[in-house]
Every structure is written in C-alpha cells, then in structure tokens.
Amino acid sequence: MTEAAVPHLRSVIRLSGVEHGPLHEYTFGARVFLHEMLYDAGWLTEAEAEGRALLADFDLVTPEQYERATWAHCVQHQAFTLHGLGRWREAEELLRTVLAANEETDGSLLRADPLSVVVWLAGVLSAQGHYTEAERELRAGLLAAESRPADEETGGRHMALDALADLLHESGRNEEAEPLRRAAIRASEECYGA
C-alpha cells in the first residue's frame, strides 16, 4: 500500500507547495504525514531523509507559522526513525529536545503521553550502554506522571513500568523487576480495560 500511496502523496505535496508555498502549514502537514508513513512502512532510509529535510525546513520558518505540536510530532518520528537505524546518539538528542520543549510549554506540546517519549529515550540510552541513566529517566518520568490527572493517562505509565522492569531484569535485578511487571499489567488493565 505504501508503494502506491507515496507517489500520490508526493504529488499532493508538490501541488500544495505550488498553491500555498513550500513552507505553508498544509504542505508541512502532508510532509509530516509522508514522513510518518515511510517510518510506519519500515522504509527507514527514506523516512530519515524526509525527516531531515522537514526539520531543516522547520528551522526556516517562525513558530507562529506552524502548529508547534506538528514540529514536536515530526521530531519524535525522526527520533524513532534514527532509533530504527541504530543511530542512538542522534535519536537521544532529538528525544531530549522534544521533552525539553514540552517542559517549556508546561506539558501542553506533546500529543502523546510524555512518558512514552521517556520510554523511547530510555531505550536509546540502554542501547548506548547508559543503563543507570536510562533507569533514572524512567523513574523520574514515572514520578512526574503521578502528579498528572488519571484521565490524561494514555498508556505511557504501563509502558514505562514495563521498560523499567525489563531494564532491571536485564541487569539481574529480578526481585526489583517483578513488582514493576505486576504494576505494568495493572496499569495496562486500568488504561485499556481488563
């Protein structure tokens, strides 16, 4: 499906670029969708190139010219793409950028649960051998999530608990991991239903 859709979406992007301009929010929106589509299809090399070009173009416009959440979404997907390519340090930088920008907006920037971004960050830290830092990020993220209303829960809590349990298990700390694994199951049931 992606093979057939990509040329059509590129045509939409070209038309939008002519009609509205290459840096217009409609054109950006279509490009962000293309970036995400390429990532979802596993076309990581193409997704990385599209994401790199997108982020360079975001730098050419002022934040008033686009929805800041769109930028954050693009940065996240570029980090996911770099993660998939094994480019851990670059992915880490982008994830930290998104989390810092989200803090600057009092947590209103990210469409997704910020805890899910922390899980990705912990993953790239672990991949680089920074296990202590990954554990610290997960624990800090879980602590921060406790202060948010329960109706804001979108699954990040159970993902973070599960990631922390995995991290502890991999480092031979099984006794610490087991209660976290049970808590992850409970959090998943609370979020998605039993």
Image (cartoon, rainbow, N blue to C red):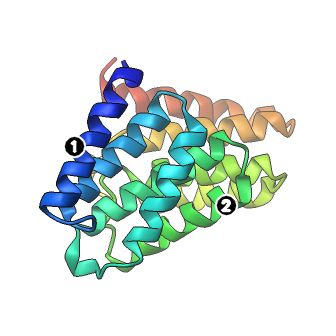
Q: Where is residue 191 in the image (x, y as percent from the top left)?
A: 33, 32
Residue at (54%, 44%) from the top-left corner?
A: 160
**Which residue has dot 1 on it?**
12
Q: Where is residue 89 in the image (x, y as percent from the top left)?
A: 72, 60
Q: How many marks?
A: 2
Q: In this view, does 32 lie to the left or right of 172?
A: left
What is the C-alpha distance between the residues marked 2 and 1?
A: 30 Å
From this viewpoint, is residue 102 visible? no
- Looking at the rendered structure, the secondary structure element under dot 1 is helix
The relative height of residue 178 versus residue 74 in the rendered view (above or below) is: above
Image quadrant in which you'd find residue 105: bottom left
The relative height of residue 191 versus residue 59 in the rendered view (above or below) is: above
Q: In this view, does 71 lie to the left or right of 124?
A: left
Q: In this view, does 100 lie to the left or right of 9?
A: right
Residue at (64%, 45%) from the top-left corner?
A: 83
Q: Position of residue 192 (x, y in %)?
A: 32, 26
* Of the image marks 2 and 1, the number of the one nearer the N terminus: 1
Amino acid, disc 1: Val
- Neighbour class for label 2 at 10 Å: few (<14), some, many (≥20)? some
Amino acid, disc 2: Glu
From this viewpoint, is residue 17 visible? yes
Q: Is residue 81 left or right of residue 156?
A: right
Question: In the rendered image, which quarter contains the N terminus?
Answer: top left
- Which residue extends farthest left? 19
Q: Which of 1 and 116 is in front in this view?
A: 1
Residue 90, numbered label: 2
Q: Which of marks 2 and 1 is in front?
A: 1
Residue at (20%, 66%) from the top-left corner?
A: 21
Residue 62, numbered label: none
- Looking at the rendered structure, the secondary structure element under dot 2 is helix
Question: In the rendered image, which quarter contains the C terminus?
Answer: top left
